[in-house]
């Protein structure tokens, strides 16, 4: 069956099984890169959307939503947004890989998540779909991660440390008969705002302009790349019929070098790259962190970032393909669409 036929079938099932009942959905983190794409897809399918937003959030492109000013760390601000909601998509998180105050990660990624879970239990929410990150599995080290893989290395930093703590909270509340599905997107690319979550769009632009002259280890490390619209489709399918507690939402496993060669080929350009040894990258990023502390600023790149970029991140989405009819598009197709979008900007 063709991809557009599957999409039509999915839309009809949404109408029959969900839209004839409670159509109100709460989305946290709906103003981010992935969040905005998800919100637009939900609106297109006729859902009534409540968005928990902060005072400085960008609301462009989110017309038609009900906005609730608040913060995931403030339970009182969440309650009004949960009224009459059957489903909750929880995408809000502290995403930065560096902060002078590690407690910020715990406040949002752990305590904020528990606040939401407690309030969802009180409100009788039917299903919670939490968006996490591939990073909680740790590097794949030559293998391919599945949902059953468990991280056997120390966290890179406070971001993944607190996401792992949130995994424990999920198990705790699932044990109290709450329906919670955790979704793990891999390296997401595709159209969308240039936020911290849209790392690959920035990388593509930097590489295309000839500014990316050095790659760690020759960029031989295997990563898993997935188009943002496929991740959104996976979220929608998990809401409708997801039964397992965890789903990896990924695409193709390929090396970063092959990814960039594909980008260059689609643009008919050849870029020359230098091999940057990991030891040199560690030294340079350490100096960059020192500079940031002395200047009371933020480092442009951190040691954690270097370690992540130098690691293998290969994943299998077989469970999502089997149970959710998840069908990620080929990387060559998705990249062509993405580069055409970047050119139009």
Image: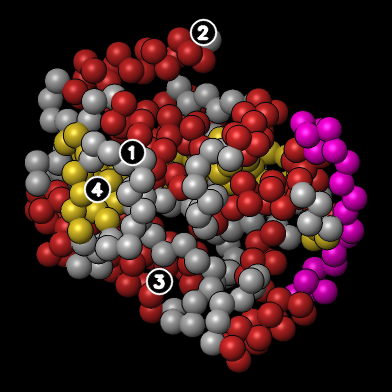
N-terminal of the pair, mark 3 or mark 2, is: 2
Q: Is residue 285 left or right of residue 158?
A: right
Q: Is residue 345 visible?
A: yes
Quarter holding residue 5: top left
Quarter holding residue 255: top right
Mark 1 is surrounded, within 10 Å at the Cα level, by few (under 14), some (14 to 19) or many (20 or more) other residues, namely many
Question: Label 2 to label 1, Cα distance in Å?
Answer: 27 Å
Question: Label 3 to label 2, Cα distance in Å?
Answer: 44 Å
Q: Where residue 163 sits in the image (x, y, percent)?
A: 43, 62
Is 268 within the magenta?
A: yes
Callouts 1 and 4 close, C-beta under 8 Å: yes
Q: Where residue 254 sits in the image (x, y, percent)?
A: 73, 40
Residue placed under numbered mark 4 in the picture: 51
- The kind of secondary structure element at disc 3 is helix
Query: Any mark on residue 1, and which?
Result: 2
N-terminal of the pair, mark 4 or mark 3, is: 4
Query: Any mark on residue 105, and which?
Result: 3
Query: Any mark on residue 39, and which?
Result: 1
- 135 in relation to 320, above or below: below
Q: Is residue 159 left or right of residue 301?
A: left
Q: Where residue 209 sits in the image (x, y, percent)?
A: 77, 49
Mark 4 is surrounded, within 10 Å at the Cα level, by few (under 14), some (14 to 19) or many (20 or more) other residues, namely many
Mark 4 or 2: in front is 4
Q: Nearer the viewer, residue 179 or 73?
A: 73
Callouts 3 and 1 close, C-beta under 8 Å: no
Quadrant containing the C terminus is top right
- 293 in relation to 182, above or below: below
Mark 3 or 1: in front is 1
Residue at x 44%, y 79% (from the top left corner):
102
N-terminal of the pair, mark 3 or mark 1, is: 1
Question: Label 1 to label 4, Cα distance in Å?
Answer: 9 Å
């Amino acid at each position: 069956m063709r991809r557009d036929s599957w999409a039509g079938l999915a839309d009809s099932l949404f109408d029959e099984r969900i839209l004839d009942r409670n159509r109100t959905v709460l989305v946290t983190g709906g103003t981010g890169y992935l969040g905005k794409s998800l919100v637009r897809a939900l609106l297109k399918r006729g859902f009534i959307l409540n968005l928990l937003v902060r005072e400085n959030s960008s609301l462009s492109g989110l017309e038609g939503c009900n906005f609730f000013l608040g913060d995931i760390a403030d339970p009182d601000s969440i309650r009004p947004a949960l009224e009459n909601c059957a489903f909750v998509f929880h995408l809000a998180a502290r995403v930065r890989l560096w902060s002078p105050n590690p407690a910020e990660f715990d406040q949002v990624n752990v305590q904020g998540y528990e606040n939401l879970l407690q309030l969802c239990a009180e409100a009788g929410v039917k299903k919670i779909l939490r968006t996490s990150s591939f990073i909680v599995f740790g590097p794949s080290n030559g293998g391919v991660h599945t949902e059953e893989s468990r991280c056997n290395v120390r966290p890179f930093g406070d971001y993944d440390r607190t996401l792992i703590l949130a995994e424990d909270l999920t198990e705790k509340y699932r044990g109290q008969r709450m329906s919670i599905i955790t979704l793990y997107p891999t390296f997401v690319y595709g159209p969308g705002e240039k936020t911290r979550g849209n790392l690959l769009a920035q990388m593509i632009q930097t590489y295309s302009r000839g500014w990316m002259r050095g790659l760690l280890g020759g960029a031989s490390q295997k990563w898993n790349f997935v188009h943002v619209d496929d991740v959104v489709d996976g979220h929608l399918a998990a809401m409708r019929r997801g039964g397992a507690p965890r789903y990896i939402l990924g695409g193709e496993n390929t090396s970063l070098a092959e990814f960039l060669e594909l980008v260059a080929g689609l643009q008919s350009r050849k870029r020359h790259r230098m091999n940057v040894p990991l030891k040199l990258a560690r030294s340079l990023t350490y100096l960059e962190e020192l500079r940031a502390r002395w200047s009371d600023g933020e480092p442009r790149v951190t040691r954690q970032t270097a370690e992540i970029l130098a690691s293998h991140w290969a994943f299998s989405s077989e469970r999502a393909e089997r149970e959710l009819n998840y069908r990620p598009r080929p990387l060559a197709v998705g990249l062509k669409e993405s580069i055409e979008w970047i050119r139009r900007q």
